[in-house]
Amino acid sequence: MRGSRFREEWGSGMKYWSETRRNCRHAEPLDCWREPVDQWLDYLDVIGRSRETQRTRWYQICEFSRFVGKGIPDVTEDDLVVCLARLNTESRRGMRSCIKTFYDWCIRHDLAEYNPAVGIPAVRTEIRGGLICPEDAVARGLSDQDEYASMAVMLGAFCGLRRIEMTRINLASDLEETPNGLELIIHGKGNRERKLPVPQRLAVKLSERPQGWLFPGDVHGHCGVDFVAKRIKKATGFPSHALRRRFATVAYYRSGCNIILVSKMLGHANIGTTMHYIGLVQDEMRNAIEATTRTDPTILLSPTAFRGSTDVFDVPYDLTTARIG
């Protein structure tokens, strides 16, 4: 079976997941789906999908197979619609994408003639607000007696790391000395890497830690995302992503509203995503409103618009000449 390597590598992990989360009803696929699912996972591995993506797809396809209770070629669009209808927006997006990808593969391997997801439009991303961790909560987290908690808070608030990116840090291989200071290699989503300068306060803390995984696991490798998520929540009272939004908001305003820079630091594929991470500072709104009450046509640029500038620049632009398009 082509999926044997996946089972050898992940078998114990799947067993652990099931034993420690007994309410997980989709630990294995329907029997008649088992071999195709294993082969499909091999395919995802070959085309470079990350282990986290493979694991997510495993649970999605296993849950779907047990929900429909049919063979692969017998599943209809209606079956998928009923399955999706019970999920929230994000879960619906993931499940629909999983089924479409799986059935595209099945059709190419003559395991199905029809893709039940082909007639269902992609689920739109839900634009939603999110909590921004306030400064007093950040300070509380940084002073927490649990070293793992304070380290995780620092990585979220000062570097904007996702919780999974925190768990993947290996101090033996992910720190680089450069002429401009210490840099951290971050292993992001979709196997994408990026580098971030390490702030001095964090660099001191990292130098005190032993080489190897920053957040080691109980048995081997690094810990899971829940390890850091629970510690951040306990230390600050806020979810881990609230620290990431705090970083995005502070970095945006203190970099002169450079959204491209902030997007790059967060590891986002496009700035549209970044815009949902930045909070609106009420003082900025009031300043903008007050600025519109001026009736003279001259535009004044703030000195913060130019790095190192100490002067306010009078820009000779006449608003009466402005055009859209």
Image (spheres, helix red, strand yellow):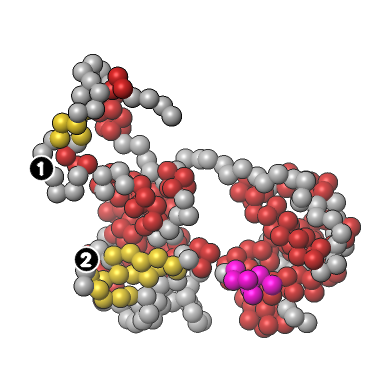
Of the residues tagged 1 and 2, which is closer to the observer? 1
Residue nearer the viewer, 315 or 302: 315
* Residue 217: image location, x then y, percent: 47, 76
Label annotation for residue 200: 2
Q: Residue type at mark 2? A: Gln
Q: Pointer 2: residues within 10 angstroms few (<14), some, or many (20+)? A: few
Label annotation for residue 310: 1
Count the marks.
Answer: 2
Please, which residue is most extreme toward the left here? Answer: 310
Residue nearer the viewer, 95 or 316: 316
Give the Cα distance between marks 1 and 2: 26 Å
Region rendered in magenta: 43-49
Is residue 136 shown to the viewer in this render? Answer: no
* Residue 28: image location, x then y, percent: 75, 69
- Secondary structure under tag 2 reads helix
Q: Pointer 1: residues within 10 angstroms few (<14), some, or many (20+)? A: few
